[in-house]
Image: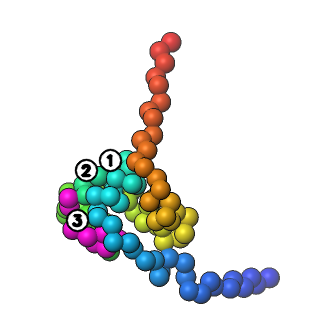
């Protein structure tokens, strides 16, 4: 049997993530998908990044929006997405597919 060794990356990516001092409304508007409707639920951006699913549920955020916020947080933590990219990006809505009737 062969054993594989995995060399861990040190420090782990994203654990030293520096959160900018943006207003929550700006961050939620930049990530899109209707998250800006729930920006008033949070006071600071660090509160968004520290909240878990139970805290977001208590604040009245629907499951689809919670999942989307968590996916954005994970992409930022992993380095797939950066705050610099979000800063240049304006809120882009994904067009819905047109339904064709036969």
> Disc 2 and disc 1: Cα gap in Å?
6 Å
Whether residue 46 is situated above or below residue 11 in the rendered picture: above
Number of the label disc, if any, that sits on residue 34: 1
> Disc 3 and disc 2: Cα gap in Å?
11 Å
**Labelled pair 2, 1 in contact (Cβ < 8 Å):** yes
The structure residue drawn at horizontal position 45% and vertical position 35%, both measured from the top left corner, is: 95
**Other-residue count near label 2 (Cα within 10 Å), few / some / many at <14 / 14–19 / ≥20:** few
Residue 86: within the magenta?
Answer: no
The structure residue drawn at horizontal position 38% and vertical position 72%, both measured from the top left corner, is: 20
**Other-residue count near label 1 (Cα within 10 Å), few / some / many at <14 / 14–19 / ≥20:** few
Horizontally, residue 13 falls left or right of residue 89, namely: right
Image coordinates for residue 73, horizontal then vertical, percent:
42, 66
Viewer can see residue 41: yes
Secondary structure beneath label 2: helix
Q: Earlier in the sequence, mark 3 or mark 2?
A: 2
The structure residue drawn at horizontal position 53% and vertical position 70%, both measured from the top left corner, is: 78
For mark 3, what is the residue?
A: 42
Image coordinates for residue 21, horizontal then vertical, percent:
33, 72
Image coordinates for residue 64, horizontal then vertical, percent:
35, 51
For the record, the magenta segment spans: 40-49
Query: What type of secondary structure mainly makes up the magenta span?
Result: helix
Horizontally, residue 83 falls left or right of residue 42, namely: right
* Residue 68 or residue 33, whichever sits in front: 33
Whether residue 44 is situated above or below residue 61 in the rendered picture: below
Secondary structure beneath label 1: loop
The structure residue drawn at horizontal position 54% and vertical position 69%, both measured from the top left corner, is: 79
Q: Earlier in the sequence, mark 1 or mark 3?
A: 1
- Residue 94: name its quadrant: top left
Image coordinates for residue 59, horizontal then vertical, percent:
19, 62
Number of the label disc, if any, that sits on residue 37: 2
């Amino acid at each position: 049997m062969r054993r594989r060794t995995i060399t861990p990356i040190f420090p782990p990516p994203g654990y030293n993530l520096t959160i900018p001092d943006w207003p929550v409304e700006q961050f939620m508007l930049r990530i899109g998908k209707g998250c800006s409707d729930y920006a008033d639920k949070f006071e600071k951006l660090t509160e968004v990044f520290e909240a878990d699913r139970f805290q977001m549920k208590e604040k009245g955020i629907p499951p689809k929006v919670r999942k989307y916020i968590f996916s954005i947080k994970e992409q930022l933590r992993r380095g797939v997405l950066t705050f610099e990219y979000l800063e240049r990006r304006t809120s882009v809505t994904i067009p819905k597919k047109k339904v064709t009737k036969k």
